Amino acid sequence: MSDLWPWLVVFALGLFHGLNPAMGWLFAVALGLQEQKRAAVLRALLPIALGHALSIGIIIGAVLVARISLPHSALKFSAAAILFAFGLYRLFRSRHPNWVGMRVGFGDLTLWSFIMASAHGAGLMLIPLFLKPVDAPLGTAAGAMGSHMHSMSGFGFGNVSSPSLLSGSVVVHTFGYLLATGAVAMLVYEKLGVGLLRHAWFNIDLFWMLSLMIAGLFILFL
Amino acid sequence: MPLLKPDPTFYPSPRLAMRGPPEKYAFVAALNPPGSRFNDALLVVDVDPDSRTYGRQVGEVKMPEFGDELHHFGWNACSSALCPYAPHPHVERRYLVVPGLRSSRIHIIDIKPNARKPKIVKVIEPEEVFARANYSRPHTIHCGPEGIYVSALGAPNGEGPGGIFMLDCETFEILGQWEMSRGPQFLHYDFWWHLGFDTLLSSEWGTPNMIENGLQPDLLLSSKYGHQMHVWDLRRRRHLQALDLGNEQQMVLEMRPAHDPTKAYGFVGVVVSLKDLSASVWLWHRNNGAWDLKKVIEIPAEPADPEKLPPMLKDFKAVPPLVTDINLSLDDKFLYVSCWGTGEFIQYDVSDPFSPKKTGSVRIGGIVNRTPHPKNPNQQLAGGPQMVEVSRDGKRIYFTNSLYAAWDEQFYPDGVGSWMVKLEADPQGGMSFDENFFVENSDYRIHQIRLEGGDSSSDSYCFP
């Protein structure tokens, strides 16, 4: 059972990313309204999810590679520094990615979603889950070190081989993301209307960037 | 400081913007006529009928230098900030970007702490505009997807080409020219866009050297002023298509695209036709992927006693309508047309954009008629309906009476005066003067009006 909860966190972060209007559902709604077709909303979801998956997949992949090639403490400190610095930078320099264009095809939308997810540091938010050292065979020095660390910190994914952890986490996260994006897009398109933006579009950027910084600090105590 | 919720004056769609509260203040560009020793100013006029100071000037901020010729101006941010592809909904609509058309100096004016006491918070000097944008004579301002877009009539030396340059909407730094590839475009005046179609359109007046010493009859009669529109790819910043209205159509000025982003059409006004001095409004529209033009309104010249005409017009024995500004209500239903020459102000129902129907008309001023305002029925008025602004809900229309300092004297040699009026528009069609609203100003000549919180030519929308 304790092996399940990191997957739940990855899924929940997918839902959280999907709820952000800047991350996809609003664009899908706009495309539907522009064409006056529900099909246009649905058609947009796949490339938007694909771009998001690529963005977070690259980050997770990089961390998994670093996990086997870097000493654990170096990995920890550099991950913490990157998260904290990115959150701090975006907090004070709230520039938004430049993109102009409503006439977008599959490739455009994939690229757009990739840029938005990357610029918001969506993948970075997942990093703390992937920092646990890999369990090595018993008897070696690395194995002793690894199991020692393992017993100290129960946070994140443990003994799953890197390729399947990468694909599994990207799929689970993107599934959560797509679920939230699709559900909100359809709800707004069919029922609520875009008027809700005026009152319900909270500046989650602030919260988002602060949570990246907190995650960075948190890593240090793992 | 970013807001926690979107700026309350941002609306996803023009339909929702129409339900916004009525404006309480109007900001008005005020310039000093040639020969004056005063600096230009931005005036604040109380337009709240429940206020004690209704219909009076209640604020003023003077420009720091002499000779700006304030003309058109706009906001740092507007409803396009809600566009889904690059949203920045938590910036504030707070600053007016106010350029001097003659000086090329740009003023950033904060109206937030107290709308009656606007404050200049930044001045961009002309040298900086020249150096960083290689343009001069900044004019129309639009807030859009990549920041603030500024129209410029020409190059620093007063020749062409004119074009568009960008300002950052938070730091107000000049980011450079907008165009990546301008094709055959040379003359420039107004621009606006169809956000739903990634298309920008621009119109043509003349280079600074062609206009700053007055309207030049020889250039006019040889069709040297602008007679084209240009279509651009908004995303790739490239020229796509030139649309020619014909050599005889001189000065293609204000452009009003449909506010609904799913509609691919708009209206542009032409000042004068060399054929018969008529003025016209043209419809641009998308036709099988390309853009096309069609004349949908023609307003004939009115025969006149040469005695009553300025020297330039005596031989023609007629007064030209001179359509110098137009405005479209947010529901894309009513088009308002200023005839600065004849003093007529016309309302058209453009529900069917291909066949506008005249639904209302009032007269005030005019080269020949000099029609008084109902508040002072004995006071003959010079100047005519010119810069027009329509409230978000479409119920109130404001306009002022002067055109451009160097040209006012040619058409109104005995002085153009300076006044601002308000009309009430009937949602079913028709309009009439608010008899209690007549703002006169003896110090300044007043020009463009912007309404608090946005109006019918300040915002663009990504949702229908």
Image: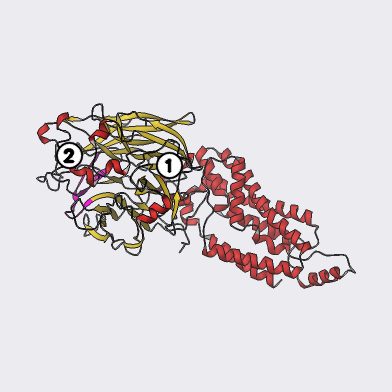
Residue A165 position (above or below residue B261): below
Q: Quadrant of the N terminus of chain B?
A: bottom left
Marks 1 & 2, CB-CB < 8 Å contact: no
Label 1 secondary element: strand
Q: Earlier in the sequence, mark 1 or mark 2?
A: 1
Label 2 secondary element: loop
**Residue B181 in sight in this render:** yes
Q: Which residues are magenta?
A: B419-445
Quick check: is B431 in the magenta stretch?
yes
Q: Quadrant of residue B297?
A: top left
Tell me which amino acid carries mark 2: Gly
Residue underneath mark 2: B366
Residue furthest to the right: A139
Q: Is residue A163 left or right of residue B162?
A: right
Q: Counting other residues with Cα less than 10 Å from the Cα at mark 1, is it few (<14), some (14-19), or many (20 or more)? A: many
Q: Residue at x 18, y 50 (%)?
A: B436
